Amino acid sequence: MPLNRRQILAAAVTAAALAPRVVVAQTPPAPTTGPFTLPPLPYPTNALEPHIDTLTMEIHHDRHHGAYVANLNAIAKDYPQIAAAPPAQILQKLGELPEQIRTGVRNNLGGHVNHSMFWEIMSPAGGKPSAELAAAIDRDLGGLDKFQNDFNAGGLRVFGSGWTLVTVAPDGKLTLETRPNQDSVLMDGKRVLLGNDVWEHAYYLHYQNRRADYLKAWWNVVNWNALNRRYAAAKAGSLEI
């Protein structure tokens, strides 16, 4: 017996509901050419599981950081001077750039250096603070436990998007700071020892609105070996970002 239109539609809906769901991956952005490059992750994207999930790492690194690099290369086509000096010099002298690109350089170069630091200071095998860094944490930040609690509290106080950070002076003094959006401490002539990204794209897929849980879990993937190297480089005057 031939099916009427309503029966055909009902059968189609049922078939669609029973069919296996197919998730189509989005095409990654095409690599950009120019003086700025996206640094590869120093570990697989699943290496920080369960504290930072694989999909977040892929989106965060490839798309968000990748977009900052692409934007910088687009700016550099007409304003090559933004790549003619180290990022610290460019960011510290933003006021000397043409007005029409200052905000773009501030946001995208800031995002580029912040994230380049961020990938470096995480690892699935974190190590421990060197004796020299541990002494500085005790001296300037009240010990490891207090430091971590205060660092996390700084991250919770950031309204909207930004970073909670520790800056390091040439004499080794450590200071807790925060920055909005992608502002970099390089704009103030400072250097960052470590920082945690509290933009929602850094944690929302896994933690949703539970920023406090993310901040606490993040310490499980901090690369203390990298921090020891950064601390020594800052005191030697060779820490670039």
Image: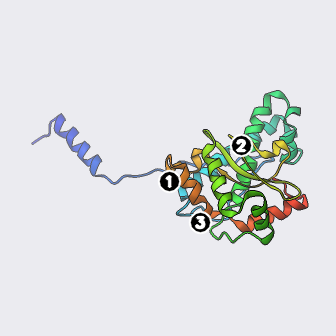
| Res 206 label | 1
The image's colour scheme reads rainbow
Give the image location of residue 11, x and y in percent.
21, 44
Callout 1 secondary element: helix
Residue at mark 3: 47
| Residue 79 sits above or below residue 176 on the image | above
The quarter of the picture where residue 82 lies is top right
Quadrant for the N terminus in the image: top left
The quarter of the picture where residue 222 lies is bottom right
Tell which of 84 and 222 is nearer to you: 222
| Mark 1: amino acid | His
Callout 2 secondary element: strand
| Res 179 label | 2
Q: Nearer the viewer, mark 1 or mark 2?
A: 2
In the displayed structure, does residue 65 sit left or right of residue 79?
Answer: left
Q: Nearer the viewer, mark 3 or mark 1?
A: 1
| Mark 2: amino acid | Arg
Upstream in the sequence, badge 3 or badge 1? 3
Q: CA distance from mark 3 to mark 2?
A: 27 Å
- Residue shown at the point (20%, 40%) measured from the top left: 10
Tell which of 61 and 144 is nearer to you: 144
Q: Would you say the residues marked 1 and 2 are in contact, meaning their CB atoms lie under 8 Å apart?
A: no
Callout 3 secondary element: loop
Upstream in the sequence, badge 1 or badge 2? 2
- Residue shown at the point (50%, 53%) measured from the top left: 206
Q: Would you say the residues marked 3 and 2 are in contact, meaning their CB atoms lie under 8 Å apart?
A: no
Would residue 228 be seen by someone viewing this image from the given angle? yes
- Dot 2: within a 10 Å radius of its alpha carbon, few (fewer than 14), some, or many (20 or more) residues? some
| Res 15 label | none
